[in-house]
Structures are given as structure tokens and as C-alpha cells.
Image (tube, rainbow, N blue to C red):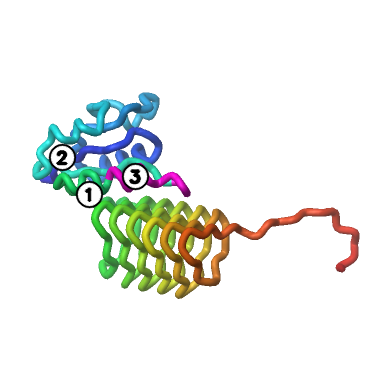
Amino acid sequence: MSKPVLVIGGGGHASVLVEMLKQLKYPIAAIISPEIDETRKVLQGIKHQLKDDAVLSYDCKEVVLINGIGSLPGNSLLRIDVFKRFKKLGYTFLTLVSPHAIVSQYAELGEGVQVMPSAVIQPGTIVGANSIINTAVSIEHDCTIGMHNHIAPGAVICGEVVTAEKVHIGPGAVVIQSVKIAENSVVGAGAYLTKNIEENNIVYPCKVIIKKFNGKFT
């Protein structure tokens, strides 16, 4: 029998995780969040507690946690703080893989990693703790994804890519093989990354300029 799960967060990201937990038959003890969207049917009928400190009323050996806080570029500190705080207090975060994802038995997932539906993770890949591999992401062979990363929906990571901590790769972005991405960097939505990038950088996609065609190539 699986340990009861406490979900920290009550928004959109948490709702996706709750559905995955239900699909996998995990018992959900409570959702811990100052606010919860009661209109989300997937969250209805689950015990709701308002303060993060409510976690402390549960023995760290008797429950596991799910980090239901989402992650956006420049706005991931809350998610990281939640992970670090409760790890220091002795709690364990569940590594959660959608039943509709494909993860090689030769891939390695760190504590608290979340793999969403239709994601694919190929052999030899290592994913660091507290990272999100979102819907329909493709991570090819022998990649190393750092802690606290968010690989957003539809991104494609080719073989042997290495990312450091706190990297965000936006929706639909493509990172070609063997590229290295340093800490706290962002690859923008739709970008095509062909070179290594240093820490604290943002890669923007090319601008598409539309103008009337005059019938001649210049």
C-alpha cells in the first residue's frame, strides 16, 4: 500500500498532478494551499488545508509530498523553497510519472521529478530532483537535466544535452545535441538552440517579420 500523499499547491499544475495520482491509485490525504480553485472537478472531494505548516501535523515517515507549485521563468523560487524547506524537515517528495509517459528503464529520475503525459525520456538520461518534464516533451539519450529545471510542453532535447540547475526550456523549444546550458538560464518558447549558453542568460526565438511580397526576391 502506498503512503498517503500531501499535495502542496491548489492551482493548475497541482490539478494535473492530482489526476495522475488518481490514475495511479495513490491515496491523497490532503491538498495544502492558501487558495484552491473549487471549480476544478479533479480537486473536489479532497481534504483542503490552508497553511503550509499543516504539513507538520503529518509524520514525515508516514506521508510523501507532491510539489504542486508551478514554475515559470523568473518565478520558480517558491517551488524551490518548498522543496528545500520540507527536505530539511525530513520529508520525502514523490517522483511521479504519468501512466501515459514513456520513460526508459535505463533513465534515472531524481526525487520529486514529475513526468507529464506523452513525455518521452530515453536511455542514459538523468533528471535532477524537483524538475518538471512537462506534456509531450522529448528528451533523447544520455542527457543530464539539472535540479529544479522545467522543460515546458512540447520541447525537444536532443542527445547528450546538459543543463545546470534552475534552467527553464520553453514550450516548443529545440535544443540540438551536446549543447550545455548553464545555471539559471532560459530558452524561450519556440527557440532553436545550437550553441552553449552561459549562466543567467535568455535565448529568444528569431523574430518573424511579415511584409507584403512585391513579386521580386531582393
Front-lying residue, 164 or 44: 164
Q: Which mark is residue 71?
A: none
The mark nearer the N terminus, 2 or 3, is 2
Quadrant of the image occupied by residue 122: bottom left
Which residue corresponds to mark 2?
Answer: 4
- Residue 15 location, quadrant: top left
Label 2, secondary structure: give it: loop
Q: Residue at x 26, y 40 (%)?
A: 22
Q: CA distance from mark 3 to mark 1?
A: 14 Å
Specify few, some or many for label 1: CA neighbours under 10 Å numbering under 14, 14-19, or 20 or more. many
* C-alpha separation, residue under disc 2 versus residue under disc 3: 21 Å
SS at circle 1: loop
Kind of residue at badge 3: Arg
Would residue 16 be found to the left or right of residue 6 on screen? right
Q: Mark 3 falls on what kind of element?
A: helix
The reply to whether discs 3 and 1 touch (Cβ–Cβ < 8 Å) is: no
Tell me if mark 3 has few (under 14), some (14-19) or many (20+) residues whose alpha carbon lies within 10 angstroms of its own: many
Q: Is residue 171 magenta?
A: no
Which quarter of the figure has residue 161?
Answer: bottom left
Of labels 3 and 1, the one closer to you = 3
Q: Earlier in the sequence, mark 1 or mark 2?
A: 2
Where is mark 1, residue-wise?
Answer: 94
The amino acid sitting under disc 1 is: Leu
The segment highlighted magenta reads 72-82
| Label 3 or label 1, whichever comes before in sequence order | 3
- At x 34%, y 33%, the residue is 10
Of residues 40 and 174, which is closer to you in this image?
174
Q: CB atoms at circles 1 and 2 under 8 Å apart?
A: no
